[in-house]
Amino acid sequence: MESIAVTGGRKLSGSVDVSGSKNAALPVLFSALLADGEHHFDNVPQLRDIVSTEQLLAALNCESSRNGNSMRIRVAPPSTPEAPYDLVRKMRASILCLGPLLARYGQARVSLPGGCAIGSRPVDLHVETMQRLGAEIEIEAGYVIAKAKRLVGDRILFDKVTVGGTENALMAATLARGTTVIENAAKEPEVVDLVHYLQTMGAKIEGAGSSVITIEGVDELQPGRHSIVADRIEAGTLLIAGAITGGSVRVARCEPAHLQSLIDKLRESGFDVHADQDSITVEEAQSWKGTDVTTAPYPAFPTDLQAQFMALMTQAEGTSVITEGIFENRFMHVQELVRLGANITPMAQVAIVRGNRGALSGASVMATDLRASASLVLAGLAAEGTTMVNRIYHLDRGYENLERKLAGLGADIKRVNAG
């Protein structure tokens, strides 16, 4: 099993490019199911979750091929619109094939999904959405079984903001008869990116990026070409990598507006951060102060950067209060940061971090989920000695060549076979 070895103490410097967004690519790739023919996608990251998506699409009679970060998907009707357990269990985003299959073929059989164990992420909202659009649904033997002659537009009001639920509703509604209005819709850039491709295919959608999205159903869609938006979470992780080492790092080929909440918190902590049209630079800092953070839906501070920011706060002067407002079980990285010497007190949805520059020492740690993996790598950059991050298959689900990018900035980091 592979691990990542990080020897701390080096200030990072230089420029690094951001890859395409995993969280944007997955729904966009699944949206191809809405139109037969050949779809072309650019800036697709090379990740385990993308491979899992290709495998699931292949099971649905789609052919895919890759040339670097470009991908072609040829869609044809499947013999059975079914997403089997063996494929879906690897990745929670697999539930996103429910809406397209149901809208396109009038039926779908989708296994209940797997993914990171960071808390309860029920499929209830996805199921209720399809029912609002006229589908009959049963949960049987671990599968969501849905049927509808044709979906019919309706008003969908989410009790809480849900990115996946919004994306599934969007895809299903594009081929529904009549008008669908999604209220309390997710505003995330990844949702907007999905809308851009759906519009390229011929969907009639207004309001993307706001809390109310209106979809006028059409009879059919056509395949098109689309470039995946930059990964704001990778960009944020790389910025924090520069910050935690006291270095100067320019993160290029990103969308600064998508990271305003992180930029604000870095500045509040004492970092000099500059943003231009497509890059963000964090400047060298001798010290920084503890800063409180609460995660919430976009445009607030993202839950997917909470663990990384916590690692940064272990090196701050003073105390930080980190509040997790999205998932109830997203502090599993705390005990691993403590193994490195961090002073953190977790209390349900709140963690108290008492910063101390230089307090971290290298040790062997275990990655518990995707973003926790990144936080441990970042902590290793600031720790004295060598940190061995194990179970990095989580990291490979969501970061394209992270260790190579960090090494390019001067980090002493390498992938090793732990045996």
Image: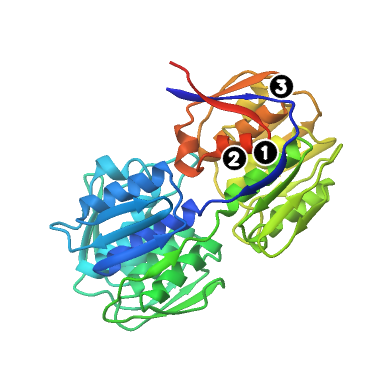
Mark 1: amino acid = Leu
For the C terminus, the quadrant is top left
- SS class, disc 2: helix
Q: Residue at x 45, y 70 (%)?
A: 195
Q: Nearer the viewer, residue 325 or 169?
A: 169
Where residue 279 sits, quadrant-wise, is bottom right
Q: Position of residue 80 (x, y in %)?
A: 15, 56
Q: Position of residue 89 (x, y in %)?
A: 32, 41
- Answer whether residue 303 is visible to the viewer in this image: no
- SS class, disc 3: loop
Q: Position of residue 297 (x, y in %)?
A: 59, 58
Mark 3: amino acid = Gly
Decide: marks 1, 2 in contact (CB < 8 A)?
A: yes
- Answer whether residue 198 is visible to the viewer in this image: yes
Q: Position of residue 305 (x, y in %)?
A: 62, 46
Q: Residue at x 66, y 31 (%)?
A: 411
Sequence order check, earlier mark of 3 and 1:
3
- SS class, disc 1: loop
Among all residues in the image, which is located at the extreme top? 419
Q: Residues within 10 Å of mark 2 (few under 14, many from 20)?
A: some
Q: Which residue is mark 1?
A: 409
Q: Which residue is mark 2?
A: 405
Q: Which residue is mark 3?
A: 341
Q: Residue at x 69, y 65 (%)?
A: 277
Q: Residue at x 27, y 78 (%)?
A: 220
Using the numbered discs, state the Cα–Cα distance from disc 2 to disc 3 in whole angstroms: 26 Å
Using the numbered discs, state the Cα–Cα distance from disc 1 to disc 2 in whole angstroms: 7 Å
Mark 2: amino acid = Lys
